């Protein structure tokens, strides 16, 4: 709806009737936002949670803020989530890299038994992830670290309007010069993926979902030995082309890296949203 209103506004400008159209535009946008606000309050008063359906599974998520409510209601990644769920097998080991509030992890736990490992370094997001995991009585191991090509510490730049105490799907990134200099940064622990697999008491992944806001190459490089394992059969990766480019990488580099480990890679772009790739052995 919001996108349609924006297009109408652009056409009004071209046709020279922008003053009248502008008033209508802002009136409609206000009504649109008010309607979402009313729906949010209804859900908050009723239960404080919102139930999401994907495939034949359901999961409940806490909605303490309108922002989080809209994240779950709109769920633009639904096509990817549902395809991934259809690909999962009961004996898979699922790693959710950039787990955020836990959508993929909570749903995957309804299919995979028992191993789901969720990685989320942002403190408030990790707390909310734990809350959502508990709401669904899901068997998920939560790791409050970022995955990278080396282990140590890193600075995470927070999206404008957010800080370490505010949860939400906001695009926080290890690219510390991506946002305006005024954006807050926090220190987080980072682990090389292969080192995590070797040293932690968890099984190596057979399926990975990666959404790391521009550090996709570093994450994949960190899992070099793991990706080479025959058992590691499936990767879903969200690509952030502008952020990749800012690090001297490209979408083609992601394809090349996955293909070098024996994956056949296909585009899974969601029109008007984000580019995803799916790699399968």
Image (spheres, rainbow, N blue to C red):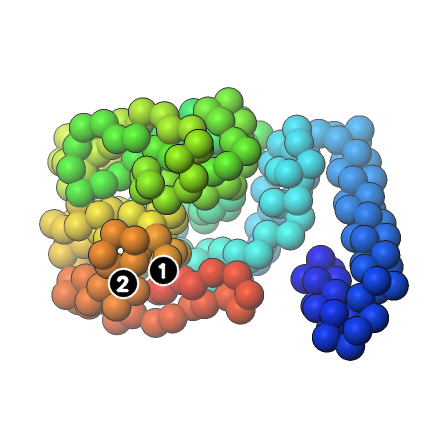
Percent from the top left, x then y, of residue 179? 41, 42
Distance of mark 2 from mark 1, alpha carbons?
7 Å
- Write down the residue under mark 1: 241
Q: Which mark is residue 250?
A: 2
Along the viewing direction, whichever of 87 and 154 lies nearer the viewer: 154
Is 174 rendered above or below residue 17? above
Residue 115 appears in the rendering: no
Percent from the top left, x then y, of residue 1? 73, 60
Residue drawn where x is 80% and y is 66% of the image: 18
Which element carries disc 2, helix, strand or loop?
loop
Percent from the top left, x then y, of residue 234? 30, 59
Please report whichever mark, 2 or 1, sits nearer to the chain's N-terminal start. 1
Residue drawn where x is 77% and y is 46% of the image: 33
Percent from the top left, x then y, of residue 5? 75, 62
* Quarter the C terminus occupies: bottom left
Residue 42 appears in the rendering: yes
Check contact, mark 2 vs mark 1: CB within 8 A. Answer: yes
Residue drawn where x is 74% and y is 65% of the image: 9
Which element carries disc 1, helix, strand or loop?
helix
């Amino acid at each position: 709806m919001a996108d349609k209103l924006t297009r109408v506004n652009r056409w009004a400008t071209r046709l020279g009737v922008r003053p009248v159209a502008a008033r209508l535009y802002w009136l409609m946008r206000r009504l649109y936002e008010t309607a979402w606000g009313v729906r949010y309050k209804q859900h908050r008063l009723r239960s404080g949670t919102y139930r999401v359906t994907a495939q034949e599974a359901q999961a409940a998520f806490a909605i303490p803020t309108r922002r989080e409510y809209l994240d779950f209601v709109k769920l633009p990644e639904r096509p990817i989530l549902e395809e991934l769920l259809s690909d999962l097998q009961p004996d898979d080991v699922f790693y959710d890299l950039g787990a955020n509030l836990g959508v993929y992890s909570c749903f995957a736990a309804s299919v995979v038994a028992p191993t789901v490992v969720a990685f989320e370094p942002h403190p408030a997001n990790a707390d909310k992830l734990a809350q959502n995991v508990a709401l669904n009585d899901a068997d998920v191991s939560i790791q409050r670290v970022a995955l990278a090509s080396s282990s140590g510490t890193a600075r995470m730049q927070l999206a404008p309007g957010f800080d370490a105490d505010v949860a939400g799907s906001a695009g926080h990134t290890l690219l510390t010069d991506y946002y305006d200099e005024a954006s807050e940064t926090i220190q987080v622990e980072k682990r090389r993926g292969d080192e995590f697999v070797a040293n932690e008491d968890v099984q190596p992944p057979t399926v990975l979902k990666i959404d790391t806001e521009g550090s996709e190459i570093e994450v994949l490089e960190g899992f070099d030995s793991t990706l080479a394992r025959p058992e590691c059969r499936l990767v879903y990766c969200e690509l952030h082309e502008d952020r990749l480019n800012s690090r001297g990488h490209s979408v083609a580099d992601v394809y090349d890296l996955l293909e070098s480990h024996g994956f056949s890679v296909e585009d899974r772009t969601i029109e008007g949203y984000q580019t995803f790739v799916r790699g399968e052995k």
